[in-house]
Image (cartoon, helix red, strand yellow):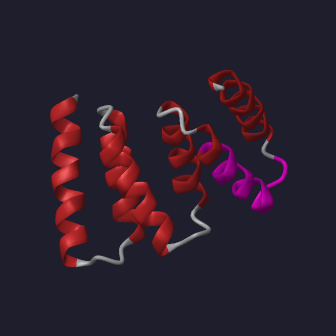
Amino acid sequence: MQKKYEKAISVFQRIIDKYPNTIEAYYNLGNSYFRINKWNEARDAYEAACELDPTFLDAMENLGVIYANQKEFHRAIDIWGKILEYDPKRVDLKKNIEKAVKLKAGQK
């Protein structure tokens, strides 16, 4: 399965090299890295997608997951909160924020 994602990474990287403003390529590059647990690379790709489109909620959500996995709870809480501004009915994100707040408090 990893080979499949590595091939996808190569394809998305070529697309980005040729068309650097292709938001979906950054998002899918992030997804491919995410699937093979390359968190820093996925983070970079999602951050690039969010820079190009600050309202790209799927990229923002995945970026929040990475922040939480990397124990950057304040960043996860912040980005999930931004998503809730656009979509306040997201109960799942509210639960993620509650959990992240508790984990952040436990870090001190």
Q: Please give the name of the residue rendered at 71% of the width and 58% of the height, measured from the top-left corner.
A: 82
Horizontal side of 105 relative to 43 (left or right) equals right
Q: Does the image show residue 8?
A: yes
Vertical order, 69 against 63 (above or below): above
Magenta portion: prevailing SS class: helix
**Does 92 appear in magenta?**
no
| Displayed quadrant of residue 97 | top right
Q: Which residues are magenta?
A: 76-89
The foreground one among 70 and 10 is 70
* Residue 17 point in image, percent of width and height: 19, 72
Q: Does the image show residue 32?
A: no
* Residue 95 point in image, percent of width and height: 77, 32
Q: Residue furthest top?
A: 106
| Displayed quadrant of residue 60 | bottom right
**Does 77 appear in magenta?**
yes
The quadrant the C terminus occupies is: top right
Vertical order, 58 against 34 (above or below): below
Horizontal side of 13 relative to 85 (left or right) equals left
Q: Residue furthest front?
A: 108
* Residue 56 point in image, percent of width and height: 57, 64
Vertical order, 28 against 21 (above or below): above
Q: Please give the name of the residue rendered at 22% of the width and 68% of the height, measured from the top-left corner.
A: 15
